[in-house]
Image: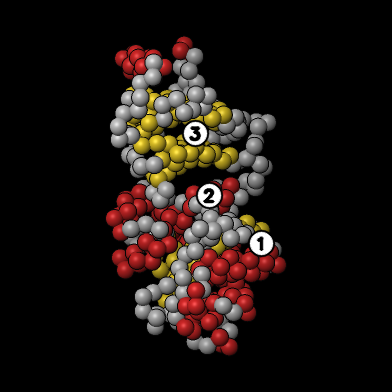
Amino acid sequence: MTRRSSALLLLLISAIAMGVSRPRGMADVLDVRHWSYPDYTRVVVELSRPVETEVRHLASDPSANKSERLYLDLPGIWVGRDYPTGIPVGDGLLRGVRLGQNTLRTARVVIDVENYDHHRLLVLTHPNRLVIDVYGERKAGDRRGGPGVRRDDRLPLDARRVRTVIVDPGHGGSDPGAIGLGGLREKDVTLRLSKLLTRKLRSMGFQVVATRETDRFVSLEERTAIAEGSKGDVFISLHANAAPRRSVQGIETYYPDENHERHNLGIAMRENGVTRDQLDDLQRTLSKWRIEEISPSSKRLASLVQRELAREMPSKYGKIQDLGAKKGPFYVLFLSNMPAILVEAGFLTNKSDAKRLRNGDYLNSVATQIAAGLERYRDTGSKLAQRNPQ
Ligand SMILES: [Zn+2]
């Protein structure tokens, strides 16, 4: 902080102390949450309005008795004196989070760090959130994030052993997802399928972590925080489709790719819960992330799963339309640093698909085929590793 801005801050603090009221038209910080994991700590700041910002890093300054910290300025946000004591974290990586009014029209979030390596900022909407992931080695003896399994990060993604599978039943709670024929709700179908898939994968020796096990609302950042915090190796999001035309049916599997096909935007809007304009923003944000790294593995996983789903499904369920493995801009697929796919298990709005999706035996077959695709991905991945020893 410059001398001038410290002076300004002092002035401001005294102004606030004297009871200067909030300027008109300001928005609020609605919530601040944090999660600690072995490799990183995630801070989520929820705002009542979208804000453009960036994270800045300041080295420690012993002469001023200031420790190393990150900060973000939030224009148009008013926190006043809502957080007088800050939010302690104390997990060996972050000391805590402080919020204050830096100027009358700009709030500042300060993250005091202990052992900073790098960070990642995600700007999300619906609700408006800033997600700040701070990476660094946690101080010894304080591993609140839990022991976890150390993944061999030097191996290419494709060759890493698949131990832990994150199963993500789409929607839930206040978000029913698509509503189909006879009121069939996507969130119920995905939860049922998720339970069957979890059981199947566990019987095959995989570790499984589900992002929800009941009918509850789970935000996208919470889903991915669960995935990363559980040291997931792959992420499988389960959904069911809807279309205005009732004749449209079939199964499709999506993987994240920056250059997704334009005609997939409709489904992306529904699954992300955002409008077309917001999706353009999303695309700009997505291009900054580590898509190049996760996309090829995700594509391979999507192709293998889709092949099992569409071609190897028991014929007793009739002909199932193979809509293929496709690129798609889904938040949930981009937020985690692991290969990720999104399965659309059928159209709730199609008579034949809806009938199948109500059938427990059919859903169990879907689970079995997804698991078979994942097994092929794992087995071919270990062959890739043998061919390219590190
Ligand atoms: Zn969905």
Colouring scheme applied when the structure was drawn = secondary structure
Of label 1 and label 3, which has the lower sequence position?
Answer: 3
Q: Earlier in the sequence, mark 2 or mark 3?
A: 3
Q: Which residue is mark 1?
A: 206
- At a point 41% along the width and 30% down the height, the residue shown is 79
Mark 2, other Cα within 10 Å: few <14 / some 14–19 / many ≥20: some
Q: Is residue 180 visible?
A: yes
Viewer-side residue, 45 vs 231: 45
Of 17 and 118, which appears nearest the observer?
17
Please state the horizontal and vertical placement of residue 111, each as a whole percent of the image. Answer: 48, 29
Q: Secondary structure at mark 1?
A: loop
Q: Amino acid at mark 3?
A: Asp
Query: Gap between marks 1 and 3, in whole Å?
Result: 32 Å
Q: Which residue is mark 2?
A: 222
Image coordinates for residue 161, horizontal then vertical, percent: 60, 57
Pick whichever of labels 2 and 1 is earlier in the sequence: 1
Q: Residue at x 40, y 68 (%)?
A: 326
Classify mark 3: residues with Cα within 10 Å, few (<14), some (14-19) or many (20+): few
The residue type indicated by label 2 comes to Glu
Single out the mark in the foreground, 2 or 3.
2
Helix, strand or loop at label 2? It is helix
Q: CA distance from mark 2 to mark 3?
A: 23 Å
Residue at 54% x, 81% y is: 356
What count of labels does the image hold? Answer: 3
